[in-house]
Image (cartoon, grey):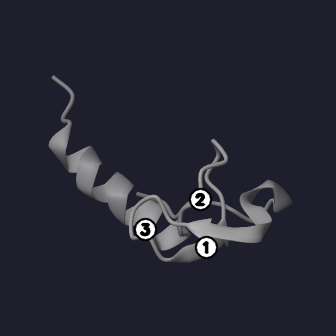
Amino acid sequence: MAPLDWRHSRHWAKKPAPCGICDKPTNLRSDLGKPVHKVCAEEWIEKHSKLVKPS
């Protein structure tokens, strides 16, 4: 999997919020606006993409 590209300012919020995966504070936001660390999101995608295999 290629790393997520979160260079756009929409992925940054001034106010930290708990990461949806690890609960530690983060200013980063997903494409859907949810607080999540980029590393946490990449690890989650990697883990769950292995669980769902196309038939």
Tag 1, which secondary structure?
strand
The reply to whether discs 1 and 2 touch (Cβ–Cβ < 8 Å) is: yes
Q: Amino acid at mark 1?
A: Thr
Nearer to the camera, 29 or 6: 29
Q: Which residue is mark 3?
A: 40
Q: Residue at x 61, y 52 (%)?
A: 30
**Is the C terminus in the top left, top right, bottom left or bottom right quadrant?**
top left
Q: Which residue is mark 1?
A: 26
> Mark 3 or mark 2, which is nearer to you?
2
In terms of sequence position, does the residue under pointer 3 or pointer 2 come before the other?
2
The residues tagged by marks 3 and 2 sit, at their Cα atoms, a distance apart of 10 Å
Q: Amino acid at mark 3?
A: Cys
Q: Which residue is mark 2?
A: 35
Q: Specify few, some or many for label 3: CA neighbours under 10 Å numbering under 14, 14-19, or 20 or more.
A: some
The residues tagged by marks 1 and 2 sit, at their Cα atoms, a distance apart of 6 Å
Q: Specify few, some or many for label 2: CA neighbours under 10 Å numbering under 14, 14-19, or 20 or more.
A: many
Residue 47, image x, y percentages? 25, 56
